[in-house]
Image (cartoon, helix red, strand yellow):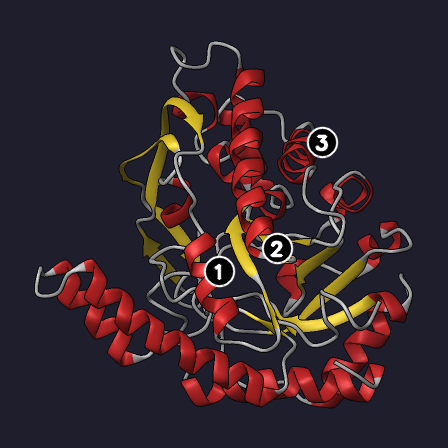
Amino acid sequence: MSNKPPFRADHVGSFLRPKALLDARESFRAGMIDAAALRLVEDEAIRGVVAFQEELGLQGITDGEFRRTFFHTDFLTQLNGVEFTGISQVKFHQHGGKELDYAPPVMTVTGKVSHAHDIQRADFEFLQSVTTRTPKVTIPSPTMLHFRGGRDAISAEAYPDLDQFYADVAAAYRTEIKSLADAGCRYLQLDDTNLAYLCDDVQRESARKRGMDPDDLPRLYARLINESIKDRPADMIACVHLCRGNFRSSWAAEGGYEPVAEVLFNELAVDGYFLEYDDPRSGDFAPLRHVPHGKRVVLGLVTTKLGDMETADDVKRRIDEAAQFMPLDQMALSPQCGFSSTVHGNDIEVSQQADKMRLVIDVARDVWGDI
């Protein structure tokens, strides 16, 4: 199990964007360069972040999500029937009790959902061409089209019956995943905030106000994800990353995994789980008792939200605590989230990002003997 994804030392996907890339994005928005020129800058930045990952010794390599503004909307709005319809005002939480106002884009399903064209294939093919390791593609979970808006954000004219909506979303994902598989992708990650939000009492109450039953949603979402990935090749590893929000070092949700754990680990047909465990807001390790044989849990014990460094001894102690509830051999280690889930990035220095990845690798080698 150790020589295939998810690797003993792994990472969620996104890295801080270099200044040259941020400047090029501004020039593109201002109409000073075209999309082709922007892509050339992205290509060069991706070569750099691939070299960074390979020099560290990582086996799973991403493009840093350098072509995206937001981890989810850049993908989802390329599906037929999905549109931007404005922004919402959300309070995100920061360490020290501070709050951060955030205005994420709102997506609405205005028509029938279908796969319009290959979304990630060209990006994957470029990544594959510049790494000698295992390239990983990260895409948003299909649940992202439902939870935040619920029934009101899905056209009743297009979908009087939500069962057809779920079927169409899953079909669109299967087509995209086949495209990636045909290009050679064998390591896929679905980024899902909603299963983690269902661990938060405030978020659960908000879901009720949107007409949803938070006790039913985990099983519904497991079915949706399973239908979306069911035709992947037998040798394609599929993982899910649960995130409680990650914008400029802030988060939206709190709470341990207990409300979703049994369904998450036993009904969701994925091979591995990237779980946040960097501070008390993620709860204890007891939900890991539900993890069955054959699945790997990547413990996100190193925070991407603060530059302060964890110690190797503290991380190892936490791994020992987790091992009280599941076998050590089924675990791996990573940062708790990406370093830049949106183009804005977390409030952390590039040097600290590198130090945290080195810590993950060093601890993984000490604990498991390989990465």
Instruction: Establish if 73 lies above or below 297.
Output: above
Residue 37 visible, this angle: yes
Task: List x then y, in percent, for residue 330.
Answer: 85, 65
Q: Which residue is drawn at 16% across and 62% down?
A: 28
Cα gap from disc 2 to disc 3, whole angstroms: 21 Å
Residue matched to label 1: 124
Instruction: Indicate which disc residue 106 carries.
Output: none
Identify residue type, mark 3.
Answer: Arg
- Disc 2 crowd, CA 10 A, few/some/many (<14, 14-19, 20+): many
Cα gap from disc 1 to disc 3, whole angstroms: 31 Å
Residue matched to label 2: 188
Identify residue type, mark 1.
Answer: Phe
Residue matched to label 3: 219
Residue 309 visible, this angle: no
Describe residue 3's horizontal placement relative to residue 350 as left or right.
Answer: right
Q: Looking at the image, is mark 2 or mark 1 earlier in the sequence? A: 1
> To which quarter of the image does residue 175 belong?
top right
Element under disc 3: helix
Element under disc 2: strand
- Disc 3 crowd, CA 10 A, few/some/many (<14, 14-19, 20+): some
**Quadrant in which the N terminus is drawn:** bottom right
Q: Nearer the viewer, residue 291 or 65?
A: 65
Task: List x then y, in percent, for residue 42.
Answer: 32, 70
Q: Residue at x 64, y 38 (%)?
A: 225
Task: List x then y, in percent, for residue 335.
Answer: 61, 72
Q: Which residue is drawn at 58% across and 37% down?
A: 174
Task: List x then y, in percent, for residue 275.
Answer: 67, 60
Instruction: Establish if 222 lies above or below 66.
Output: above
Element under disc 1: helix
Identify residue type, mark 2.
Answer: Leu
